[in-house]
Image (tube, rainbow, N blue to C red):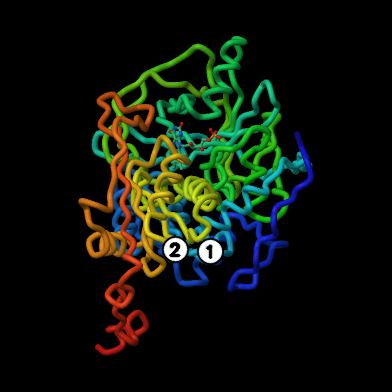
Amino acid sequence: MHGRRRHRAPQNDAEGRSARNMIEGLRDFLKRLEGRGELIRIRKEVDPRFEVAALIRDIQQRRNQPVLFERVKGSTLPIVSNTCGSYASVSAALGVEPRDLSRIWAERLTHAAALPSAEAVPGQYQPSSLGRLPICTHCEKDAGPYITAGIVAARDLETGLTNLSYHRMQVIGDRELRLRLSPTGHLFEMQQRAERLGKALPMAVLVGVAPTVMLAAAARTNPGLTEVDLAAALAGEPFPLVRCPTLDLAIPEAEIVIEGEMLAGVRRPEGPFGEWMDYYVPVMDNHVLEVQHVWTRPDAMYYAIHSGSAEEIVLTSLPINGDIYQAVKKWVPSVINVACWPMIQFCVIQMEKQYEGQPRKALLAAFGAELTRILFAVVVDPDVDIYDPSDVIWAMTTRCRPDRDTFTIPDVPSFGRDPHQVHWGRLGIDATAPLQWPAEFERKKVPGSGQIRFEDYL
Ligand SMILES: Cc1cc2nc3c(=O)[nH]c(=O)nc-3n(C[C@H](O)[C@H](O)[C@H](O)COP(=O)(O)O)c2cc1C
């Protein structure tokens, strides 16, 4: 399955980083963000029960920048969050311009190929325990503390390939975590195969990884490719791996590594948990991870993602944006960018319209490219900022006739877990200006607006 890599080398970014030195660990990324004045350091002690989540939400709503909580009650480890909380941050991580994100994502991953396994080097880890980690409780009715940025690394017993995927993990005690495995994910399939053989599935949970690994782990891979191959394609060079301290598994370096095995034939109650759509998922019988060892790097940092927050949406949407971009491009070559933002279900497609009706082709291609998560799709012109929902609403309210420029597709199911069928159907919206009257749809400009800052006049 392994072949030669053929992906296009990434361009240099504004800071002069090139394809040859793209692989940047979490610590270096934080340093770079701090150098750009983007890292928020919270120096006051914070409580991992609710307070951290409330602060993450406040930061995301007002400044949406990466944050480091230096002092956390009950733990010596600091907490990092939101390094991938905006398209600007992930563009910085990948060394690209935000407007090129979907195109470059699609290009790099189209040419991604399986890599021969790199020789894994020993990691520098010291023993720890779940009780020493600042694991946060996020929402009022959550069952308790949850690991929310844990990436499971597990080797498929059949293919021998190592899969990486995020799973929420309820902490039951020092020896037990309960995980949600979506039945559409690779880990679920792998666990089913192991279970049929009556075998527990060994796995390592990685917390706090390089930004390219954070991005790749949220993507679904094609057969024969692993998320490490995707991380390498995104970074532009083979991805270095370390050996797990006790398991026979090569993994990307992580601040924290939790080793254990997922029990065969065992399901126990997990939840409730405040999930990505801002509702609570009810208690369900879910998978059980028996924890054998917890390891931390010296001066380790814990990583927390608030479910459904900007960071989860950006991470989840990037692969979807890339897929939709590619599908639309096939029929509408003048597509510029795609963003499922500020909700995964809401897809914004930016294009240069060449003839009336063309946006409808883009909408159909988008719906066809992602059949579970996109419910609403809107097409906008190049002068609209697709990362700014108020700009998108401006286009919808000034360039779209709701009675003529929209269409619905009835009775199409979407998410797997939708017991009341409230997420069925699709709505397509053409919010592009009519080509016929360009002068009437020229957007007004205020010279200096965007550069002039009122603070300089106080
Ligand atoms: C922050 C975050 C949390 C997630 N939580 C879960 C989860 O609890 N269960 C799950 O099955 N998938 C979860 N996902 C989605 C999977 O990581 C994602 O679907 C991944 O693409 C699965 O890939 P795979 O099927 O190739 O393993 C989460 C994703 C993110 C970004």
Judge whether residue 128 can be spotted in this image. Answer: no
Screen quadrant of the C terminus: bottom left
| SS of the residue under disc 1 | helix
Q: Position of residue 224 (x, y in %)?
A: 68, 33
Instruction: Compare residues 343 and 82 and report the one nearer the observer.
Output: 343
Q: Nearer the viewer, mark 1 or mark 2?
A: 2
Is disc 2 surrounded by few (<14), some (14 to 19) or many (20+) residues within 10 Å? few
Is disc 1 surrounded by few (<14), some (14 to 19) or many (20+) residues within 10 Å? some
Q: Is mark 2 within 8 Å of ligand 1?
A: no
Amino acid type, mark 2: Gln
Give the number of the disc on residue 215.
none
Q: CA distance from mark 1 to mark 2?
A: 32 Å
Amino acid type, mark 1: Ala
Q: Position of residue 119 (x, y in %)?
A: 78, 42
| SS of the residue under disc 2 | loop
Q: Position of residue 205 (x, y in %)?
A: 55, 35
Quadrant position of residue 294 = top right
At 69% from the left and 25% from the top, the residue drawn is 159
Of mark 1 and mark 2, the one earlier in the sequence is: 1
* Residue that mark 2 sits on: 354
Quadrant position of residue 168 = top left
Instruction: Compare residues 175 and 435 and report the one nearer the observer.
Output: 435
Asked if 50 appears above or below 176 in the picture, the reply is below
Asked if 96 appears above or below 403 in the picture, the reply is below
* Residue that mark 1 sits on: 92
Tell how many labels.
Answer: 2
Judge whether residue 15 can be spotted in this image. Answer: yes
Left or right, 400 with respect to 37, comes to left
Instruction: Compare residues 100 and 294 and report the one nearer the observer.
Output: 100
